[in-house]
Amino acid sequence: RYLTPGTRLMIHERKLSKELMLNGPLTTCVATVKAALNEIECSVEMQNEGFANLVRGSSVTMDEVLRRAPSNWYIEAQEAKALGLIEGVI
């Protein structure tokens, strides 16, 4: 990965906007809730796989990404290079 001078890398969590409507037989309601939960859990797994790929070989820990990503972590190009998140600034 490369960045140009003056750019910033933003590390953030995936976002979801969804309304959950429960209406009908209880077993159908349970299935609807489980489907929504599965969607969220799979999305978190995919997000964390991406985070793990991003920090592999860098000095940034997964714990730091998980702590900072919810609030949109911005990293300037030179800092991203120093942290090992990118190969260089071109």
Image (tube, rainbow, N blue to C red):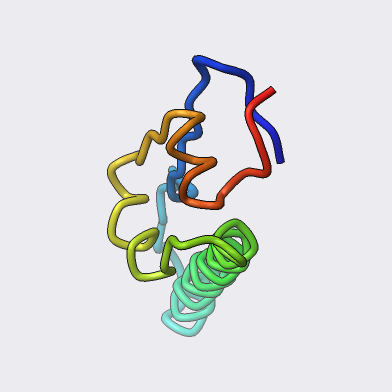
How many tags in the picture?
Answer: 0
Identify whether 6 is placed above or below 22. Answer: above
33 relative to 3 in the view: left or right = left
Residue 24 in the image: state x and y as whole percent.
45, 68
Identify whether 25 is placed above or below 23. Answer: below
Identify whether 14 is placed above or below 76. Answer: below
Q: Quadrant of the N terminus?
A: top right
Most extreme residue toward the bottom, as rendered? 27
Residue drawn at x 50%, y 33% as measured from the top left: 9
Residue drawn at x 28%, y 60% as measured from the top left: 67
Residue 33 in the image: state x and y as whole percent.
45, 72
Question: Which sits in the foreground, 38 or 89?
Answer: 89
Give residue 12's quadrant in the image. Answer: top left
80 relative to 74 in the view: left or right = right
Residue drawn at x 49%, y 40% as measured from the top left: 80
Most extreme residue toward the top, as rendered? 6
Identify whether 7 is placed above or below 53. Answer: above
Question: Which sits in the foreground, 18 or 14?
Answer: 14
Residue 25 in the image: state x and y as whole percent.
46, 77
Question: Which sits in the foreground, 57 or 34?
Answer: 57
Question: Which sits in the foreground, 34 or 4?
Answer: 4
Q: Quadrant of the C terminus?
A: top right
Residue 42 in the image: state x and y as whole percent.
59, 71
Residue drawn at x 37%, y 50% as measured from the top left: 69
